[in-house]
Amino acid sequence: MSHEPLRDPPRLLDASSTDPLLRDALRVVRTDTPELASLNALADGVQHAISNPGVTTTVASATGGSALKLVLAAVVACAGMYGAYRLATATAERAAPRDIEAPPAAPPVAIDRPHTATTARPTLDQPTAPVPTHVPTEEPRDPGREPLAPSPTRLLPLAPAPVTRVHTTIPHRERARPKLAQPEAAAEASRDEQVTTRQESKRGEDEVTLLESAQRMLQDNPQGALERLSEHRERFPSGAFAQEREALYIDALQRVGRTGEARSRARAFLESWPQSPHRARIQRLIDGE
Amino acid sequence: MFRVPWPMTALAMSEYEPETSAELSATAQAVVRVDERAFRQLVIEHGPHVRRLVRSLGIGESELDDVCQETFIVVHRRLHTFEGRSALRTWLFGIALRVASDYRSKAYRRREQPTELLPELQHGATAEHALERKQAWSLIESLIAPLSEERRQVFVLYEIAELSMPEIATLLACPLQTAYSRLHAAREHVERAMAALRRKEQGR
């Protein structure tokens, strides 16, 4: 290629002949940078999709355009699984209180669904956890620990903190999925799927199971839930479920009667995650539910 | 620019089976964690560029996050194929182009609503800036929307993403001369459309 006369022309932004309006627009567009919170949300979303083992092998060998489609399909599938996964954890549980006006309506079915199997098989899921940070708090023990005296020491590290992440992407996908009312068989299958997914990803499992256990405790033992959430915060300070954790925490605070604290955290929540899917519910808390 | 041992990234994050991951030594786990952080850094560093590109390729506000996410997922999967023959950003753009293009065609098939109607959630002092951005984007979009995808890509890569023409030609796998003529045609259209807009404004 010897196109000597071909030189990059001045860009429209730099050319004096360009309409000033167009030049301004180009300048603005070129420097349009998302907030750090959005970028964190993006990174979170990517990390989640990646840590789902379903996609990995498919994509690793993919090449070219058609492979890209394969990749996208896998990504969608992955996001779907993940959607169901989270559905079972944070969102589905929150969705009910969001839809129904009554604040204490934490539907036990939705919450328990992902974990009935696990609960029935004590300690099976976490026998050989090699992660050094693994704290001895197994799921199966939760049901037995209902009535508890408050132990405020555990709550301290959970300050609203410099949380700057926003989950915009994943919840978006969740919305695209049918949320509740899975047929029994499908529910069973997805439960199995979830269980294997969890077994495959130890770290993810710990993070999610702990959160789930807090969710299950929320209604009957909000104090216990607070403790779980504090533990979660300690173990996964920059985990991907910070938003769900905080939403649950605020809910639990409200339930144990610490409404002032609940409200101030709710405000911090909205500042940190202005686009959160939990926004409506948290906002209701502030508005004086 | 940030450097990571990419082969290690590929190995640690793509090839470890989840089951074996449970058996990793503490050191190997630490490596995986470092890799996760490194990749996260990559996303945060290059996210804005990818986002701008994807948006200027016609992806609406509401799908922007999804497309960016998918782009980086693909990036992650294909990191091991990055040979450093182009700048990392150019390579990322190549993936973003394909993901966006795929997404757009799917969107057309789904007959998606134009997403510009969805107002951006903004608050306080940023509102004015947000409005300015919104107007700028919508002006650009209205000017380049009629372009063919090929012309639009060249225009956007040159005028917004600020790649050089040879880079663009490489990225789009077309002769340099072709890239130039696409740019020329695109600019001609944009300038004409802009002039028409002005006339319309004055006619009011």
Image (spheres, coloured by chain):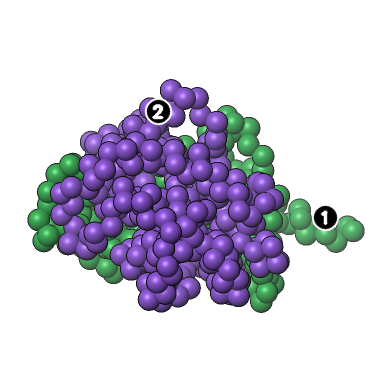
In this rendering, position of residue A218 left or right of residue B139: left
Residue at x-position 27% and y-position 68%: B2
Colour purple, chain: A
Q: Residues within 10 Å of mark 1 (few under 14, many from 20)?
A: few
* Figure check: A84 above or below A211: above
Marks 2/1: CA distance? Answer: 62 Å
For the N terminus of chain B, the quadrant is bottom left
In this rendering, position of residue B131 left or right of residue A235: right
Label ID, residue A188:
2
Q: Amino acid at mark 2?
A: Glu
Q: Nearer the viewer, residue A237 or B137?
A: A237
Task: Pinpoint residue A5: horizontal percent, then vertical percent.
Answer: 41, 57
In this rendering, position of residue A106 left or right of residue B194: left
Q: Amino acid at mark 1?
A: Lys
Q: Are marks 2 and 1 on the same chain?
A: no
Residue at x-position 38% and y-position 27%: A189
Colour green, chain: B
Q: Nearer the viewer, residue B202 or B85?
A: B85
